[in-house]
Amino acid sequence: FRDHSVYKGHQVFLYKRAQIFVADLWGAFKGEGYGAFGDISSLTIFADYIVPAILRQYGVLNYDLSLAKAIDSNSEISAGSEPEVEIRACSIYAVEKMKDLIKAKLGQRV
């Protein structure tokens, strides 16, 4: 569950697997017993390759030319590499910002 990388000399934790585990427990136990988490809404998106692809498709994420070419040619982006960490972290940030905007617009918890 230690989803971490070193990015520009700093250790970065994204915790995708740990968050999936918590979400699965919450879902399986319907928020009761082993699935009771009072802060379930604090989970972020599960930073994988699907969300960034969708965010890019809709123009939310833009990559520099060399990274865009690498992704468009299906080149592997190494796990823990600087571009991979940036893509995952920016995806989380973008979705959190979208949640904030929706909340402000609707006046509801998202």
Image (cartoon, grey):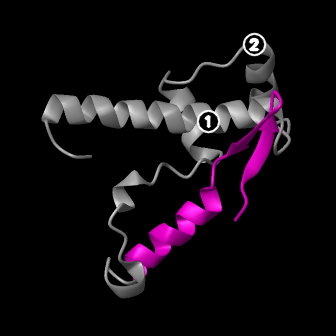
* Position above or below: 60 against 53: above
Queried whether the magenta region covers residue 98, the answer comes back as: no
Q: Which residue is mark 2?
A: 65
Mark 1 surroundings within 10 Å by alpha-carbon count, few (fewer than 14), some (14 through 19), many (20 or more) = some
Quarter of the image for residue 95 reads top left
Residue assigned mark 1: 89
Q: Does the rendering let one see residue 86?
A: yes
Distance Cα–Cα, label 2 vs label 1: 19 Å
- State the image coordinates of residue 20 (x, y, percent, origin top left): 55, 65
Quadrant for residue 9, please give it: top right
**Residue at image coords 42%, 37%:** 96
Q: Residue at x 86, y 41 (%)?
A: 78
The local secondary structure at tag 2 comes to helix
Of callouts 2 and 1, which one flags the residue occurring earlier in the amino acid sequence? 2
Residue 15 in the magenta stretch? The answer is yes
Amino acid type, callout 1: Ala
Q: Residue 25: where, in percent of width, then height?
A: 46, 78
Magenta residue span: 1-28
Left or right? Give the position of 80 relative to 53.
Answer: right
Q: Quadrant of the N terminus?
A: bottom right
Q: Residue at horizontal 25%, vertical 33%?
A: 102
Tell us which disc is closer to us: 2 or 1.
Answer: 1
